[in-house]
Structure formats: structure tokens, C-alpha cells
Amino acid sequence: MEIKRPESKQPIPEHAKRVFQGILFDVYQWEQKMFDGSMAIFEKLKRPDTVVVFPVLADGKIILTKQEQPSKEPFIGATGGQVDKGEDILSAARRELLEESGYEAEEFILWDAQHVTSKIDWVIYTFIAKGLKKVAELSLDAGEKIELFPVTFDEFLEIGMEKNFAEVEIVKNLYEAKLDPSKRKELEKLFKPL
């Protein structure tokens, strides 16, 4: 499966210069002509893309995670993380699913891919993983505490409305499913196990 990166609505121009290189973020700046003819310095951050994976068990339950990370409030989310340099998106999704859940999946469905803000060059790719097989224990980073908990589709919709739900990029889809019966059917079909 070839996954095309969505285009940014405000891309970093080719003539932009990287003025800072950080551990996670780089800062790019460029001169931009304004409507009155004056010039101004614009800037934008760039960071590695991330993957989010919602694994679906054979009984239809969706595996969510309760997570803790240093200097962050505890949150509920999916498995996922940063795409490593040189790694393709699907490989990153497979790796993060395995590391954070111990599962491998037969099928990955790309549910969503979007730039979440115009000021950061950063795409979040959201997958649904089906045909799960438990093959390992969790292999977490030093800064992660993760507890898996399976939920029903209805519980998933409710948890997605909570303020500590981390996957804000898909909350709109969850609201639509709660409010529109046809959108709910579409989403239920998408999350139906193999």
C-alpha cells in the first residue's frame, strides 16, 4: 500500500532557511511579501510525522490505551508514535502497534491523514488494524507507561468525547457518528473485525 502524504495548505517554501534544528522540532523562516508591498519574516515548525493505530480484536472490541508520559497529564489514546527517519508510514504503523500492544495485524486501513495545524509541517496518519495476533509483550520507551484496555464501539464513541482523549484529529469523525445514523453505520463498518 503506497500512502501519499497530504499537501499542506501553507507549505514551507523551497527558499525557506532552517534557523533552528531541535530534537523534535526544526524552525524554518522566509521573507514573505505582504499585500501592501512590504516584506515580513514568516516561520513554520517542522517535525516528524506520526502514526495512530486503533487495533480491532476478533470480538469487535477496539483496543485503547491509558498512557502516562513525563510532564504530561495521563491520557487515553491509541497505539502510535513518531515515524522514524527513512521509515515508510505503514512500517511505522506496524512497528508502533507491535511495540505498544504486542500485536501484529493482517490488515491496516488508512482511516485519516491530515496536517493538524497550518503552523507545523506535520501529518498524523490514523489507521485501523484488523486480524490481530498477539506475538510479544509491550516494548515501551523509557518515557512511556501504557495499559491496554479493550472497549466496545459505543464505549469508543463516548471515550472520544472526553477531555483526556488524545487523538483530537479524529474527534470530528466520532461526533459525526454520534449525530448522524448514516455516518455511524459507515464507521461501524470500518471498525468491523475481519
Image: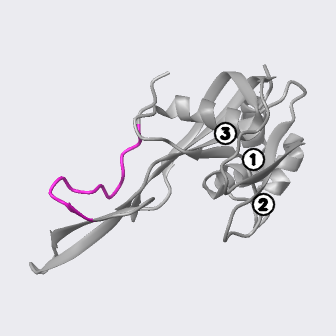
Residue under label 1, please give it. 177
- The stretch in magenta equals 5-19
Q: Is 162 located above or below residue 102 in the figure?
A: below
Residue 164 position in % (x across, y down): 76, 65
Q: How many angstroms separate mark 1 from mark 3 (CA)? A: 19 Å
- Give residue 30's quadrant in the image: bottom left
Q: Is residue 43 left or right of residue 153?
A: left
First in sequence: mark 1 or mark 3?
3
Q: Marks 3 and 2: which is nearer the front? A: 3
Which residue lies at the image location 69% right of the left edge and 58% below the top edge? 166
Q: Please, which residue is most extreme toward the left here?
A: 37
Prevailing SS of the magenta stretch: loop
Q: Position of residue 106 (x, y in %)?
A: 69, 18
From mark 3 to mark 2, how far is it between C-alphas? Answer: 18 Å
Q: Is residue 62 visible?
A: yes
Q: Is residue 64 above or below residue 192?
A: below
Mark 3 highlights which residue? 53
**Residue type at mark 2?**
Met
Horizontal side of residue 135 vs 109, given as left or right: right
Spatial CA distance of label 2 from label 1 is: 12 Å
Kind of element beneath mark 1: helix
Is residue 94 rendered magenta in the image? no
Inspect the image, locate mark 1, and give the three-letter code of the amino acid beneath it. Answer: Ala
Residue 57 or 161: which is nearer the viewer?
Answer: 57
Give the number of the mark in front: 1 or 3: 3
Residue drawn at x 50%, y 21% is 1
Q: Residues within 10 Å of mark 1 (few under 14, many from 20)?
A: some
Question: Within 10 angstroms of label 3, few (less than 14), some, or many (20 or more) residues?
Answer: many
Which callout, 3 or 2, points at the residue further toward the start of the chain?
3
The residue carrying mark 2 is: 161
Query: Amino acid type of disc 3?
Result: Val
